Image: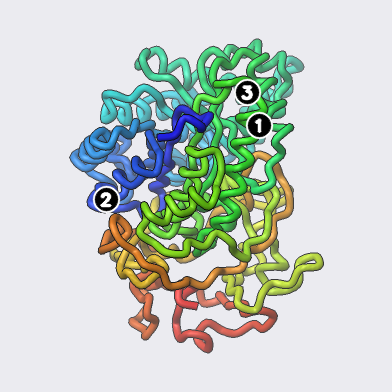
Amino acid sequence: MSDSTPFEMRLVHLDLKGAPPKVSYLSKVFPLFRALGANGLLIEYEDMFPYEGPLRLLRARFSYSPAEVKEILHLAGLHQLEVVPLVQTFGHMEFVLKHGAFAHLREVAAFPNTLNPHEPESLALVGAMIDQVLQQHPGARRLHIGCDEVYYLGEGEASRQWLQQEQNSKAKLCLSHVRAVASHVLARHPHVTPLAWDDMLRDMPEDQLTASGVPQLVEPVLWDYAADLDVHGKVLLMQKYRQCGFRRLWAASAFKGATGPSQALTPVEHHLRNHERWLQVAAGGPVGSLQGIVLTGWQRHDHFSVLCELLPVGVPSLAACLQSLLHGGFTEAVKRRVENILGVSGLETAGPVRQRHPQPRHALQPAPAQLRGRPAGEEQVRDRLVQLLPSQSEAHPPHHGPAHPAGGSQPPGPVERPPAAAGSCPAAGLLPGRGGGVAGGECAPEHAAAAGAAAGPGRGSPSAAPAQRPRPGQLSGPLMGVACARAGQLSSGPPAAAHPCPCRQLCGARQPPTVQWSLGKKKISKEKAHGTCCAICT
């Protein structure tokens, strides 16, 4: 390991709400993560955690068993990877609030993304989730409580009445819930430190942050996935947080899943530039001001969204980014080291992706004009860009995170019960190269019900990312062989009939009859392009 990195902790984010890997695959990549410079994991279980009792209905059909969670922790320990579990406790609660049993706890009745902070049962619910997760993680030193992108906060009826009182504000409402959740963690698990995403805190007045007591309870994770993130602005934000009383700060970058909700291949150059900027941020503040960095790797932009890059596809980007952090930059020597570790020749970092502003939750959406294959500003969508054309009501506005509703847009509607599983559909996608089968994936959902667009701390209008074509390479080691992800749940409705698509295992889910494809500027039906096909094989 190198001493040139300013980040003591380097956590690889495992987003299990989309194409969760088999434990057998994790047993292959954990030693690779360690060899590349990681020393921890941020595991976002969502519905893959084996909840019990009244929470059992939160489980996905193919969730991990308690024995598998224990095995994951054992494997992480073997390779000296500290595990930090993540439990959403405020925003991004779709996997909980979509169920009829918990629908009454929504902040706004129509939308299952945000928890109502006024209901006593809300805190009891997230407290029970936290307790079950930490019971399965007996050695955990930290717990991430989410609290990002709390959309529609203050718009529920109880919140509207509460906000009519002169001394109340949305910031105070948000801080009170964060304080309550963090206090529960520390009261029940005194040796566990709560972490929280920082986007809801950034614009709050310093006096409110200081007076809330939150800085003494949580460690904020400053996330920004842009290739051109504002270094000076981040240094000032860190200074603000320290003045408010936060004792330790974390950074969060992205190695994949932050450039488009349906991105297929990872634009390595974009993510390398993002990590170079974070190195500059760390150098611009006091030594040791950042406790560590989380390298996020989003599989979906939210619970209802389609899959973006899968973990095996993002491994080369992860390798380049980790080594860049470890050695203070991505030099030719670092590049050769990455190629040697991965067993590849001629690692390509350049790609056609255009810079987006800012970034996502946790990820960006193409603008509506780009979804239709028309020019966006002065840029023309490339002829080889193939994008799903949603109906006008489904088109996502260009904005913040994986589920950020822009003004006037609507997030997912009410979901009384989880979608009925029409069957399983194991994914077996190939990592670009001659090496053969590295899997990772599941059936694509029938449609993306989540409303929201880009992600990242700032807001802006993103550009569409042209798809990159795979190039041959040589694969060996952990990248070689079959590591099939768990079968996913199909959307409600009967499965599609068999068809000649070479990736039929990935696109077996029934497509909405109104779906069209946009190929450059020319619209063609999916039947004409590839029979009854999907975006994977175009």
Q: Earlier in the sequence, mark 2 or mark 3?
A: 2
Going 69% across and 16% down the picture, which residue do you hit? Answer: 208
Identify the disc placed on residue 28. Answer: 2
Residue 372 position (above or below residue 88): below
Check disc 2 and give the amino acid type. Answer: Lys
Q: Secondary structure at mark 3?
A: helix
Identify the disc placed on residue 173. Answer: 3
Q: Secondary structure at mark 1?
A: loop
In the displayed orientation, state which residue is furthest to the right: 378
Camera-side residue of 498 and 344: 344
Q: Earlier in the sequence, mark 1 or mark 2?
A: 2
Camera-side residue of 227 and 477: 477
Real-space Cα separation, disc 1 to disc 3, in angstroms: 8 Å
Q: Quadrant of the N terminus?
A: top left
Q: Quadrant of residue 188?
A: top left
Q: Position of residue 28 (x, y in %)?
A: 27, 50
Check disc 1 and give the amino acid type. Answer: Gly
Q: Which residue is mark 1?
A: 154
Q: Position of residue 367 (x, y in %)?
A: 69, 61
Indicate which label's residue lies in the foreground, 1 or 2.
2
Real-space Cα separation, disc 1 to disc 2, in angstroms: 45 Å
Camera-side residue of 109 and 511: 511
Check disc 3 and give the amino acid type. Answer: Leu
Q: Secondary structure at mark 2?
A: helix
In the displayed orientation, state which residue is furthest to the bottom: 528
Q: Are marks 1 and 3 in contact (CB under 8 Å)?
A: yes
